[in-house]
Image (spheres, helix red, strand yellow):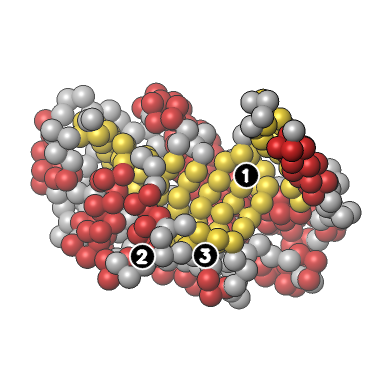
Amino acid sequence: MKRLLGFTLFVCVLIIASSCGGNKTPAAKAAIITDTVKKKEIIVEKKYDRTLNDISRFIAGLTPDSGSAYSSICKKDVSWKNFSTINEKEWANVTTKRIVVMDEWAKKELQEERAKKGTIFYPFSGPDILHAITFFPDAKNYYLMALEKCGSLPNLNEMDSAATSNYLNSIDHSLQDVFSKSYFITKKMLNDLSTAKVNGALPLICIFLERTGNEVLETKYYHLKEDGNYEETKSDSLKSFVKVDFRRIGSKEVQSVYYFKSNLENKNLDKNTGLQAFLNKMDTCTTYLKSASYLLHYKNFSTIRDIILAKSKTVLQDDTGIPYSYFSQDKWKVKVYGKYYKVTKDFAGVFQTDLLQRYQKDTAKTNLPFSLGYHWGDKNQNLLKAVKQL
């Protein structure tokens, strides 16, 4: 009886706590709690502060939802109107020519991976949840890792018209390479995502989520401990990653993006025992690699390469990922797509003769109907899908 009373009190506390949101309009999420006495699932509504989603829609150039605190700004602010108009055209173009085509291709070629709804691991990603979520829209967790800091969403209430205009211009500038080439350039990103401009990866992650039909529910920062577990933190010096909870509009299924500020070179990763422990605890995943500067070809990135090969059931990548020679026929079933072409001039020396031979003799290879990666100019793109044979 005491256990049942305790559980009832626990549920009541949750309901009371989740209903306390001040004057802000919350978005509800269904959380399932199990009554260990009656073995029944009880649905408790967790309330999310809608402010983060309203800010995300604002910086994405999207029309505010009904009741948004920023509706009046969007109606009056000329800089936001111009930003929204320009972005609508850019997003319409990239959606039609790339995103929709990628999705249709993935429905056929990534059917099994999509159905698993597990973890997508995307090292060297920058803030690019856009292409990962297009290929794998229903994953429970997405782990993104890159050099750029986590950052934060802007406080629109503290920004005057000039500051708002400058911020939106910075957002637009930071997205141009993704619109035209499909990838971020690291040197540019470190400047574009500085505190004085966009301020980190988080704003762009939220924009991509909004533009792919999702709503941002919650963001929290965490510190990784030595054993790979983590705890919430508000200290800038202890922010190992930011976690973004979101859901597709109209759905109750909550998904999460984890963005880790991390240097994955051996000398740095080997010192980062918390991140290594986290990755070693990671469930079997699907790894996605794109425009990765061929880093995994080099011995100074062998640690993260070994983790990918050990943890992945499937690896989907272009030739900038793990060298073809690591996918031995006795362990991996490989399928290639598109055309393997000479590497761009910036990366001469990483051409893979064995991969070229595979393309030349593989009559089953199929064309890629979309362009992703470094060959955005000549459209000679390639993809490789490797599935581990258990």
Q: Earlier in the sequence, mark 1 or mark 3?
A: 3
Q: Residue 23 at x, y = what percent?
A: 89, 54
Apparent side of residue 344 relative to residue 170 in the rendered image (left or right): left
Can residue 185 be seen at all in this image of the molecule? no
Q: Residue 97 at x, y = what percent?
A: 48, 38
Q: Residue 352 at x, y = what percent?
A: 14, 49
Q: Quadrant of the C terminus?
A: top left
Q: Quadrant of residue 234?
A: bottom right
Q: Quadrant of the N terminus?
A: top right
Task: Please report the residue visible at 41 percent of the width from the left and 65 percent of the height from the top.
Answer: 226
* Residue at numbered disc 2: 273
Q: Earlier in the sequence, mark 2 or mark 1?
A: 1
SS class, disc 1: strand
Apparent side of residue 234 relative to residue 281 in the rendered image (left or right): right
Of 78 and 155, which appears nearest the observer?
A: 155
- Please tell me the numbered disc located at residue 246: 1
Would you say the residues marked 2 and 1 are in contact, meaning their CB atoms lie under 8 Å apart?
no
Measure the alpha-carbon separation of dots 2 and 1.
29 Å
Say what amino acid the circle numbered 2 marks: Thr
Say what amino acid the circle numbered 1 marks: Phe
Can residue 4 be seen at all in this image of the molecule? yes
Apparent side of residue 292 relative to residue 135 in the rendered image (left or right): left
- For disc 1, the neighbor class at 10 Å (few under 14, some 14 to 19, many from 20) is many
Q: Quadrant of residue 82?
A: bottom right
- For disc 3, the neighbor class at 10 Å (few under 14, some 14 to 19, many from 20) is many
* Residue at numbered disc 3: 223
Task: Please report the residue visible at 76 percent of the width from the left and 54 percent of the height from the top.
Answer: 51
